[in-house]
Image: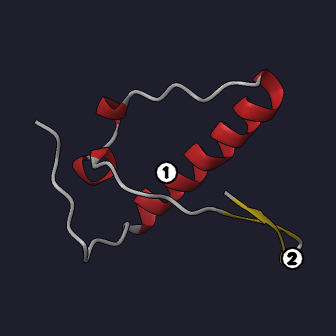
Amino acid sequence: MEPTCSVDWSPSPDERVTLLELARRSIVQGVERGRGLQVDPTRFGEHLRVRRACFVTLEIGGGLRGCV
């Protein structure tokens, strides 16, 4: 059974680190290999296994460089 989503949920500091690491790895994988990153969701806690939308801002030197 897939975990359920709470509208009020906000990631913990550790979950934020994990999500940022995954975002970085995914971008590198896409740029270097031209394909998406394969992720095993069972490696993560229940909150990170829930299907959700995602918005990522890309910054360099504090300046906005793009959004995904």
The amino acid sitting under disc 2 is: Gly
Residue 13 percent location from the top left of the image: 44, 67
Residue 27 lies in what quarter of the image? top right
* Residue 33, disc: none
Seen in the image, is 62 located left or right of residue 26?
right
- Nearer to the camera, 5 or 41: 5
Residue 22 percent location from the top left of the image: 56, 44
Residue 25 percent location from the top left of the image: 66, 39
Residue 57 drawn above or below residue 3: below
- Nearer to the camera, 24 or 3: 3
Q: Residue furthest left?
A: 1
**N-terminal label among 2 and 1:** 1
Q: Secondary structure at mark 1?
A: helix
Residue 42 percent location from the top left of the image: 29, 31
Q: Residues within 10 Å of mark 1 (few under 14, many from 20)?
A: some
Residue 26 drawn above or below residue 12: above
Q: Quadrant of the N terminus?
A: top left
Residue beneath label 2, please?
63
**Which mark is in front, 2 or 1?**
2
Q: Residue at x 32, y 48 (%)?
A: 51
Q: Residue at x 66, y 57 (%)?
A: 68
Q: Residue at x 16, y 47 (%)?
A: 3
Residue beneath label 1, please?
18
Q: Residue at x 16, y 54 (%)?
A: 4
Q: Secondary structure at mark 2?
A: strand
The amino acid sitting under disc 1 is: Thr
Residue 52 lies in what quarter of the image? bottom left
* Mark 2–mark 1 distance (CA, rounded to whole Å): 23 Å
Residue 27 drawn above or below residue 16: above
